[in-house]
Amino acid sequence: MAHQVLLMQMMSMFGCARCSSDDGNSNIIATLPNCSYPSVYAFGDSMTDTGNGIAGFPDEFISSESDPNGILFPQHAADRYCDGRLLIDFLAFGVRRRPIYAYLRAFAGDFTYGVNFATSGSTARNVSTWDATAKFSTPFSLNFQIQWLRRYKVRLQFYYTQTRVNQSLPSLDALNSSLYVVYSGFQDYMSGFYDDSLTSQQASANVPSVVQAIVAAVQRIYDFGGRDILVVNLPPLGCLPALLTLHPGNSSLEYDEYGCLKKYNQPIEWHNSFLRSSIAALRTTYPDANLYYGNLNAAFYDILKNSTHYGILHPLSACCGHGGVYNYNKVVTCGHMGTVEGMVVAANSSCPNPTAYGSWDGIHPSQAVNRVVATAFLNGRHIEPDGGLNCSPDYSNWYTPN
Ligand SMILES: *[C@@H]1O[C@H](CO)[C@@H](O)[C@H](O)[C@H]1NC(C)=O
Ligand SMILES: *[C@@H]1O[C@H](CO)[C@@H](O)[C@H](O)[C@H]1NC(C)=O
Ligand SMILES: *[C@@H]1O[C@H](CO)[C@@H](O)[C@H](O)[C@H]1NC(C)=O
Ligand SMILES: *[C@@H]1O[C@H](CO)[C@@H](O)[C@H](O)[C@H]1NC(C)=O
Ligand SMILES: *[C@@H]1O[C@H](CO)[C@@H](O)[C@H](O)[C@H]1NC(C)=O
Ligand SMILES: *[C@@H]1O[C@H](CO)[C@@H](O)[C@H](O)[C@H]1NC(C)=O
Ligand SMILES: *[C@@H]1O[C@H](CO)[C@@H](O)[C@H](O)[C@H]1NC(C)=O
């Protein structure tokens, strides 16, 4: 790791009123070194995708480059399912790099500081039979994404021995000291919960195979040379506006104290605890690696417990959607039009204050949530081993990707 000793007081440089409210403990921040990695590589699904989905399947993921998705970016079309920045954006920024571009991006990408292999609709587990007509599904599972990483290194080696390419790319020496982020498994459960084809019991039965697929990816990144690997756990799916709307509980007993559906949260809790112990076991196998377990789930519960503190006053509602208790309607999802009670309606705009919402579109978290989670990981909260990345982020260098 390339952490450097902090020479200056941090808070005066931040010039950012919101930092202290996100960070929880500004005294800790002032003493941490700068976050710094030469480059960042990411793997996962639409929680992390910055353009692979739409590059591979332009029609299916067209809405990711249309308003109101990406509304907080000055140029809008951001190829992200969010009002603004994703967790990976804040992580890449926090370690003083720029946003990392999608691997499949054919032109005008900036690959100076790494590559994003995450693809919307992709699972952790291998896809053996792929149904091209299934909505929001792609065959580019983690296994594919790791193959892309290996292919990428082969190309880098080629470029550095030939002089035919004039592009700013990480040095080969930087690969092993880079940060690798694996945030996968959401799709393995969510697609079945969404269309009610997966029961809670079936989801629980799938946990070992989903976790094993993530563990296999971590092992392959280690074999590749990566030594700093952050594995992110899953959010409480029972708190998603989409599932709260589509599959409400029959009685209050089906909800937890925060208003989330227990039947979806239980298998996810098991997934997370199995993932956590699997990563702990890998630390014994690979003592020379920094294997981080990022507890995004706990960071989200922090927000539920203290929503006013975070300014996320509607943690269970979608900012962009149409009607109902959770502002979600499956026939008029964010960025789309639909017919409701004989009327054509459109969910084509952001709510006035997206930072007050826990969910952007009923499925994906808002930028406000992503920022809280990234800051927690970088500052050493909700991350194992204790201390986490243990550094002070700096988001001020954000520039506009296009
Ligand atoms: C830490 O980062 C800040 C900018 O965020 C920079 O001004 C400062 O020089 C850095 N400190 C070190 C020791 O690199
Ligand atoms: C997934 O696919 C990869 C590559 O084909 C293979 O090595 C691996 O064993 C597969 N995993 C499972 C669980 O089948
Ligand atoms: C490569 O890029 C540099 C900086 O942009 C430029 O000065 C140089 O002429 C380019 N070389 C070629 C062969 O295009
Ligand atoms: C990076 O790690 C790989 C796999 O362990 C190793 O083969 C390679 O030599 C390392 N590269 C550098 C520059 O240390
Ligand atoms: C909720 O009620 C419906 C209709 O009575 C029933 O089919 C379903 O099994 C119930 N769900 C649960 C979780 O009890
Ligand atoms: C969190 O909420 C509790 C009350 O629910 C409050 O006492 C506490 O001060 C809050 N914490 C912060 C950091 O705002
Ligand atoms: C959203 O859709 C409605 C209904 O079609 C239309 O009147 C309105 O102009 C649209 N707004 C934007 C921002 O596109």
Image (spheres, rainbow, N blue to C red):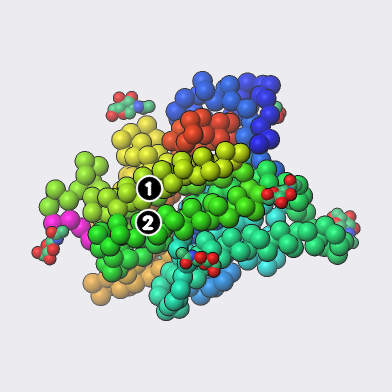
* Residue drawn at 30 percent across, 59 percent down: 205
Q: Answer whether labels 1 and 2 touch (C-beta < 8 Å).
A: yes
Q: Is mark 2 within 8 Å of ligand 2?
A: no
- Say which quadrant the N terminus sits in: top right
Which amino acid is tagged 2? Pro
Can residue 163 be seen?
yes
Residue 138, given in percent of the width and then of the height, sits at 48, 70
In the picture shown, does residue 60 fall above or below 158? Answer: below
Q: Is residue 270 magenta?
A: no
Residue 322, which numbered label? none
Left or right, residue 244 beside residue 370: left
Q: Quadrant of ligand 1?
A: top right
Can residue 53 be seen?
no
In the image, the segment drawn in magenta is 246-250
Left or right, residue 152 beside residue 382: right
In the picture shown, does residue 90 fall above or below 55? Answer: above
Mark 1 → mark 2, Cα distance in angstroms: 8 Å
> For this rendering, which residue is in front, 276 or 134?
276
Mark 1 Cα within 10 Å, few/some/many (few <14, many 20+)? some
Left or right, residue 187 beside residue 168: left
Main secondary structure type of the part rendered in magenta:
loop
The residue identified by callout 2 is 208
The residue identified by callout 1 is 274
Residue 310, given in percent of the width and then of the height, sits at 39, 35
In the picture shown, does residue 340 fall above or below 314? Answer: below
Mark 1 or mark 2: name the one nearer the start of the chain: 2
Which amino acid is tagged 1? Phe
